[in-house]
Image (cartoon, rainbow, N blue to C red):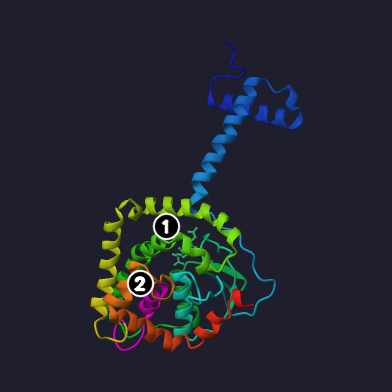
Amino acid sequence: MSLGFQASPAGLLEYLQTSVVQLLTDPTQLSPGQGVLVGASALLVGAVLWSCCGGQRRNKVKLRAEFTPGKVYLHAPPPVKAIPCLTPFGMKLETYLRMADIPFEHMYGRSMGPKGKIPWIEYNGEAMGDSGLILEFLNREKGVDLNQSLSAADKAVSRAFTKMVEENTYWGLVEDRWIENFDKLQDLFELPWFVMFLIRSAKGKIKKTLWAHGIGRHTKDDLRGIIEKDLRAISNFLGTKPYLMGEEPTEVDAAVFGQLSEIVWATSGSYLHRIVTVDCPNLLAYCNRIKDRYWSDWDQLTNKTKKDQ
Ligand SMILES: N[C@@H](CCC(=O)N[C@@H](CS)C(=O)NCC(=O)O)C(=O)O
C-alpha cells in the first residue's frame, strides 16, 4: 500500500507541509490520509503547548485605565455584615497593608486575579496575585520590614505557622463554609436567592479540590481533629503574649489573623467558632486585639453593606 510519502522523517514532514498548504488553499482536494495527518499533528502541537504552558496560565484581568504611580489598588470582595472581607487572604493582605501603613484603594469586586484567585493587586499598571508574594513585593518596593526584630529562628517559626494556617487550617474553613454550612452561604454572602443556584456548581468544584488536597478524604471527625490541633497549636504558642512573636505584630500575625478572623466573625455556630472563641479564649482576645488596633473602621465597613443600600 502506498503511503503517499517517502517512509522517512523528512518525507513525512514534506507530506505534512503539502497537506497543510492543501488545507489552506483547497481543502476539498485533501485526501483522507492527509486529513488524518493534519488533524493528528494539530492535536499533538496542542497537547505540547497545553502541557508546557498549563502550569503558568495567567487569568486575563481588566486593569484600570488610569492609576496613580506607587499606589496599591486592592482587589477583593466587598464587605459583608459579618466581616470586611469574606476571604481570609483578603483579610490578611489588608491587615498587612494597615500594619505597614501602606496607602491603598479598595477595588471591590469578585473578579479573579492573574492567578485565578483573590485577592490581588494592581500596582503601577500591573496585576499581581498571591498574598504572600504581594507582601514580599511590597516589602521591597516600600522598604517595609515588619519582621525586622525577628531572629532567623523566629522567622522560621513564623513561616511554619503561616504555611500551616494557609495550606492546612484554611481548608478546614473552606470545608466548613462551603460543604458543611452551604445553606448559610446566601446569608453570609448577602446574595439574592437565585445566585445560589449558580453557586451550587462551585460546591462540587470545592469538593473535588478538597479531595485533591487530601483533606477531603478524611472522615468528618478526623478532619475536625486535624484542624483543632492546628488551632490549639496557635493558641499554645501564643500563650499570654499579645502577638505571636512577642510584644509587637509581625507578618505572621496578618496571616494568622486573616484566617482566625473568618472563624471568629464569619462561621457562627460551627465547631471552628467554638474552638477559637470558647476553648481557646486567648485566640479570641488576640483577634479582638488586632481588630481594635488596625480595624477602627470595621463597623463602618460592615454596616454599609449592599443589603442596607
Ligand atoms: N495563595 C493565595 C490563596 C488565595 C486563595 O486561595 N483565594 C481563594 C479565595 S479564599 C480563591 O480565590 N479561590 C478561588 C479558586 O481557587 O478558584 C494567596 O495567598 O493569595
Crowd band around label 2 with a 10 angstrom C-alpha radius: few (<14), some (14–19), many (20+): some
Q: Residue furthest top?
A: 1
Q: Is residue 131 left or right of residue 160?
A: right
Q: Is residue 224 left or right of residue 251?
A: left
Element carrying mark 1: helix
Question: Is 247 contained in the magenta span?
Answer: yes
**Residue drawn at 33 percent across, 55 percent down:** 215
Question: Where's residue 142, x and y in %?
Answer: 49, 82
Q: Which residue is mark 1?
A: 179
Q: Is residue 15 visible?
A: no
Question: Is 27 contained in the magenta span?
Answer: no
Quadrant for the N terminus in the image:
top right
Tell me the kind of residue under disc 1: Ile
Q: Which residues are magenta?
A: 244-262
Mark before the other along the chain sequence, 1 or 2 = 1
Q: Which mark is residue 301?
A: none
| Tag 1–tag 2 contact (CB < 8 Å) | no
CA separation in Å, label 1 and label 2: 16 Å
Residue behind label 2 places its C-beta within 8 angstroms of ligand 1: no
Tell me the kind of residue under disc 2: His
**Residue drawn at 48 percent across, 72 percent down:** 90
Judging depth in this view, the residue of 185 and 33 nearest the camera is: 185
**Residue drawn at 37 percent across, 54 percent down:** 213
**Secondary structure character of the magenta stretch overall:** helix
Crowd band around label 1 with a 10 angstrom C-alpha radius: few (<14), some (14–19), many (20+): some
**Residue drawn at 49 percent across, 78 percent down:** 94
Q: Is residue 226 left or right of residue 92?
A: left
Q: Which residue is mark 2?
A: 273
| 32 to 63, vertically: above or below | above
Element carrying mark 2: helix
Question: Where's residue 200, x and y in %?
Answer: 52, 54
Question: Where's residue 309, x and y in %?
Answer: 64, 77
